C-alpha cells in the first residue's frame, strides 16, 4: 500500500484513468453510504475539491464486513484501483481492495446528517460545518482570494508589511475599540479616583487595532508602495449581515499617488481578484451560482470586464434626491450615505460598481486631504451591488499645518501622534490608500447573504464561541 495519500482533487482532475495515479490510497470523511446487491457505494470527501469520490466495496474486499458500520461523518482510508465509473454523476471511482475505518461517528449523535441544514443552525456547529459543501466551498474561495490579493500586489512591486495588532493610539477614528489589558477587572488599581493606567501592561491604555493605516503610512513614506493584510477589530454594536467584530482588512498605501491614482488602483484590484476567483475556483463558483445567486457569475464577469462609474458625493446626493425613492433615512448634503443609499446608487442608478469621491469633511476622518474651500475631502468609497461599501479610502493630508488644524477640530490631542506628524515634517510626500474588507469581498464573490458565513469563527456582539 503506498504511504502517500492522493488528494481527491488530483484524482478527479486527471484527463483519463491512465494519467491518474493507480492504484491509489485515498482518505476522507464519509458523506453517504448506499448498498445494493451486495455492493456498497461510499461517497467520501477530503476537502480538496467540492466533488466527492465514490468508493466501491464488494464482497471480494476482505474488509467488506466494515461497510455495515460506515455512517455519515466517519473517517476512512481506502486503497484500490481507479476506474471509469459506470454510475451517473461521476467520472471515476475507486474499487476498494482494502478499507480501514479510522474514526467512527455515532449516527445517533452526529449532528450533520445528510439532510440540508439551515445556515443559522450550521453557525452553531462551526467546528463541523467545514465538512458541508457550502463551507468547504467558502473556505476554498477565501483561500484563493487571499492568494490572488497577494499576487496582485506582488506583481505590481508592492511590499507586504505587517502592522501591529495592539495599538496605543486610542482614536484612529474608524470605530469603537476593544481594550487590551492585563489589569484585574475585579481589583482595579486606582489613583485619584481613576484607574491607574500606569499599572497596566504597557503603562498606558492599549487597544486592538481598527486599521493598520497609520503605520502603513509610515512605510509608504519610505518604501513607496506597500500593503497590509491582517485582522482588525471593531467593538461596534452593528448586528448586520455585513459587520463583524473581528475581520480581515487589506490596506494598500501608495506614495506619490493622488485620489485618481488610488481609484484606478481600487478598480484594477477588484477586477483582478474577481477574475482570479472565477479562473481558479470554477467548481465552487458554479456551486454558489446554482444554490445561492443565479446571477453570480454573470455579475462578476461583468465587473471584471467593465469600467466602474465615478461620481462625487455631491452628485450622488443629487441623484438620490431626484430618485423619487422612499428612503428610510433622509438624504441631505452633509450626512453620511446609508447602506440603502449606497445600494440604490450601485444597483439601480448605475447597475455597476460606483466610486463616490469628495465627501463632506465634517463626516470623514482627520487624515483625509482637505479640498480647496475646505468643505470636502479627497475620500472615496467603492460601492458594489448587494453589499454597498466594500472599499473606503482617501488621499492623505500631507500638509502639516492643515493636518494639525484638522486634528484640533476633531478634538484630538496631537501628542500621541508625534510620529505621524513627523512624517509631514520630514520629506512629506503626497500619498493615498484604501481599506478593503476581506470578508465583504468574499461575501460578494460567493453570493452568500451573511458575513458570519464567510469567516470560519465569526465574532459578533455576544458571540465568541470556538
Ligand atoms: P461601514 O460604514 O460599512 O460600517 P466603515 O466606513 O466603518 O464601514 P472603513 O473604516 O472605511 O469602514 O473600513 C474599510 C472597509 O472595511 C470597509 O469598506 C468594509 O469593507 C470593511 N469593514 C468595515 N467595518 C467592517 C466590519 N465591522 N465588518 C466587516 N468589514 C468591515
Ligand atoms: Mn468607510
Image (spheres, grey):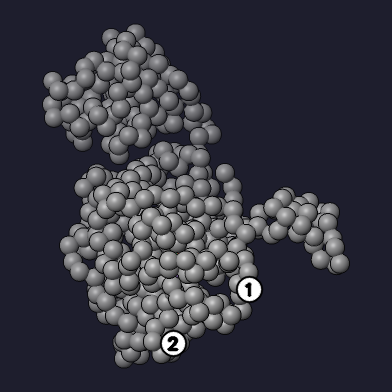
Which residue is under mark 2? 374
Q: Quadrant of residue 270?
A: bottom left
Question: Which quadrant of the rendered structure holds the C terminus?
Answer: top right
Q: Is mark 1 within 8 Å of ligand 1?
A: no
Residue ID at (36%, 31%): 46
Work out whether residue 325 or residue 300 is closer to the camera in this orientation and state it. 300
**Residue at image coords 51%, 48%:** 457
Question: Where is residue 362 shown, x and y percent of the image?
Answer: 49, 83
Q: Which quarter of the figure is the N terminus placed in?
A: top left
- Judging depth in this view, the residue of 5 and 31 nearest the camera is 5
| Disc 1/disc 2 C-alpha distance (Å) | 21 Å
Between 365 and 222, the one lying in front of the other is: 222
Q: Quadrant of residue 283?
A: top left
Give the tally of numbered discs: 2
Q: Which residue is located at x 23 percent, y 15 percent?
A: 23
- Quadrant assignment, res 248: bottom left
User: SS of the residue at dot 2?
Assistant: loop
- Is residue 409 at least partly visible in the picture? yes
Specify the label residue 17 is tagged with: none
Residue to which mark 1 is pinned: 413
- Looking at the image, is 374 positioned above or below residue 443? below
Q: Position of residue 225 (x, y in %)?
A: 35, 57
Looking at mark 2, is its residue's CB closer than 8 Å to ligand 2? no
Going from N to C along the chain, the mark reached first, 1 or 2, is: 2
Residue nearest the viewer, comparing 29 with 33: 29
203 in relation to 425, above or below: above
* Residue 301, x across and y down, in percent: 20, 59
Q: Secondary structure at mark 1?
A: loop
Residue farthest front in this picture? 426
Amino acid at each position: 500500500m503506498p504511504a502517500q495519500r492522493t488528494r481527491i482533487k488530483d484524482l478527479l482532475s486527471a484527463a483519463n484513468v491512465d494519467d491518474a495515479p493507480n492504484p491509489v490510497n485515498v482518505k476522507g470523511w464519509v458523506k453517504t453510504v448506499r448498498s445494493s446487491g451486495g455492493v456498497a457505494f461510499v461517497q467520501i470527501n477530503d476537502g480538496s475539491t467540492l466533488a466527492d469520490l465514490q468508493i466501491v466495496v464488494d464482497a471480494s474486499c476482505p474488509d467488506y464486513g466494515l461497510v455495515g458500520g460506515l455512517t455519515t461523518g466517519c473517517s476512512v482510508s481506502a486503497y484500490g484501483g481507479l476506474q471509469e465509473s459506470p454510475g451517473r454523476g461521476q467520472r471515476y471511482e475507486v474499487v476498494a481492495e482494502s478499507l480501514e475505518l479510522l474514526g467512527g461517528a455515532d449516527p445517533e449523535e452526529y449532528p450533520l446528517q445528510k439532510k440540508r441544514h439551515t445556515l443559522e443552525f450550521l453557525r452553531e456547529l462551526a467546528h463541523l460545518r467545514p465538512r458541508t459543501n457550502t463551507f468547504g466551498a467558502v473556505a476554498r474561495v477565501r483561500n484563493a482570494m487571499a492568494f490572488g490579493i497577494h499576487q496582485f500586489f506582488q506583481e505590481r512591486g508592492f511590499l507586504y508589511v505587517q502592522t501591529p495588532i495592539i495599538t496605543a493610539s486610542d482614536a484612529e477614528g474608524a470605530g469603537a475599540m476593544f481594550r487590551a489589558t492585563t489589569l484585574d477587572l475585579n481589583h482595579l488599581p486606582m489613583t485619584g479616583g481613576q484607574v491607574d493606567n500606569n499599572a497596566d501592561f504597557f503603562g498606558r491604555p492599549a487597544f486592538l487595532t481598527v486599521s493598520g493605516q497609520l503605520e502603513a503610512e509610515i512605510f509608504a513614506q519610505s518604501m513607496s508602495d506597500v500593503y497590509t493584510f491582517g485582522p482588525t477589530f471593531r467593538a461596534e454594536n452593528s448586528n448586520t449581515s455585513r459587520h463583524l467584530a473581528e475581520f480581515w482588512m487589506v490596506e494598500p498605501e501608495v506614495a506619490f499617488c493622488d485620489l485618481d491614482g488610488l481609484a484606478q488602483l481600487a478598480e484594477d484590484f477588484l477586477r483582478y481578484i474577481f477574475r482570479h476567483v472565477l479562473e481558479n475556483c470554477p467548481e465552487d463558483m458554479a456551486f454558489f451560482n446554482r444554490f445561492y445567486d443565479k446571477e453570480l457569475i454573470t455579475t462578476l464577469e461583468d465587473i471584471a470586464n467593465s469600467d466602474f462609474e465615478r461620481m462625487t458625493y455631491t452628485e450622488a446626493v443629487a441623484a438620490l434626491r431626484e430618485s423619487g425613492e422612499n428612503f428610510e433615512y433622509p438624504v441631505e448634503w452633509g450626512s453620511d450615505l446609508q447602506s440603502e443609499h449606497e445600494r440604490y446608487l450601485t444597483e439601480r442608478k448605475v447597475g455597476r460598481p460606483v466610486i463616490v469621491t469628495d465627501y463632506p469633511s465634517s463626516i470623514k476622518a482627520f487624515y483625509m486631504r482637505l479640498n480647496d474651500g475646505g468643505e470636502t475631502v479627497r475620500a472615496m468609497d467603492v460601492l458594489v451591488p448587494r453589499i454597498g461599501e466594500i472599499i473606503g479610502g482617501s488621499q492623505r493630508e500631507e500638509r502639516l499645518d492643515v493636518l494639525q488644524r484638522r486634528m484640533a477640530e476633531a478634538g484630538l490631542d496631537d501628542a500621541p501622534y508625534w510620529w505621524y506628524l513627523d512624517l509631514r515634517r520630514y520629506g512629506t510626500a503626497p500619498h493615498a490608500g484604501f481599506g478593503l474588507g476581506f470578508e465583504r469581498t468574499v461575501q460578494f464573490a460567493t453570493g452568500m447573504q451573511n458575513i458570519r458565513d464567510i469567516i470560519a469563527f465569526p465574532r459578533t456582539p455576544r458571540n465568541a464561541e470556538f
